[in-house]
Image (cartoon, helix red, strand yellow):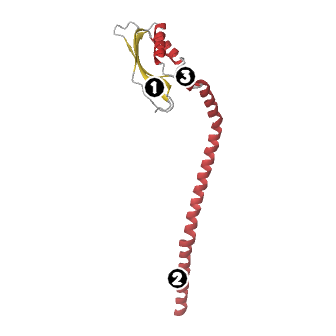
């Protein structure tokens, strides 16, 4: 009987070792691979869903792009090939006069050279009514030359007569010569 109990214990130990080997080298690696595969499948499904949602947005984005392109037009056409900023600064002064803006001061700054476009910073000061200032800026943006308004400072005059002091920093662009920069 002792021999039989030893044999049963040996069989149980061998069965336990087989089960442990199966669990450690079979079940657990397969389980981790299954979890990784499910996670990858879920990520792919999420990517596909996102791509589908983005694809639905594409016509809206194309429409916005067309509207923006129509609004901007060919902005490079508004950047002249020659510097000629004196003529343009005179046009700014004329616009100020046209809108009854007083105490005009227009000062060009140091020219900044770059690869494709050069620019000249311009400081402008004047005095007038807010409606006149607004119309001046609107007309300035419709000129045939690209002007970027960097900074605008509007302040009431000390007597509160409805007059506004305006200080503006703008940049006027022109094309760089080939080989410059």
The picture quadrant where one finds residue 22 is bottom right
- Depth check: 24 or 170 in front? 170
Other residues around mark 1 within 10 Å, as few (<14) / some (14–19) / many (≥20): many
How far is disc 2 from disc 3 in space, using C-alphas? Answer: 89 Å
Of the residues under marks 2 and 3, which one precedes in the sequence?
2
In the displayed structure, 15 sits above or below 94; it is: below
Other residues around mark 2 within 10 Å, as few (<14) / some (14–19) / many (≥20): few
How far is disc 3 from disc 1 in space, using C-alphas? Answer: 13 Å
- Depth check: 88 or 70 in front? 88
Question: Residue 143 at what x, y percent from top left?
Answer: 53, 17
Q: Mark 3 highlights which residue?
A: 78
Residue at image position (39%, 24%) is 110
Q: Mark 1 highlights which residue?
A: 119
Question: Residue 174 at what x, y percent from top left?
Answer: 50, 24
Of the residues under marks 3 and 1, which one precedes in the sequence?
3
For the residues carrying marks 2 and 1, which lies nearer the camera in this image? Answer: 1
Q: Mark 2 highlights which residue?
A: 13
């Amino acid at each position: 009987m002792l021999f039989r109990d030893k044999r049963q214990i040996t069989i149980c130990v061998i069965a336990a070792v087989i089960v442990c080997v199966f669990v450690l080298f079979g079940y657990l690696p397969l389980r981790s691979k299954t979890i990784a595969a499910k996670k990858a499948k879920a990520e792919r499904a999420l990517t596909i869903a996102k791509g589908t949602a983005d694809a639905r947005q594409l016509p809206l984005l194309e429409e916005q792009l067309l509207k923006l392109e129509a609004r901007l037009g060919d902005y490079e056409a508004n950047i002249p090939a020659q510097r000629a900023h004196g003529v343009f600064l005179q046009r700014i002064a004329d616009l100020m006069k046209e809108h009854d803006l007083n105490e005009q001061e227009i000062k060009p700054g140091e020219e900044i050279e770059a690869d494709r476009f050069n620019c000249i910073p311009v400081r402008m000061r004047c005095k007038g009514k807010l409606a006149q200032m607004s119309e001046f800026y609107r007309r300035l943006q419709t000129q045939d030359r690209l002007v970027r308004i960097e900074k605008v400072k509007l302040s009431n005059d000390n007597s509160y007569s409805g007059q506004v002091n305006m200080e503006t920093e703008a940049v006027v662009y022109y094309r760089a010569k080939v080989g410059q920069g």
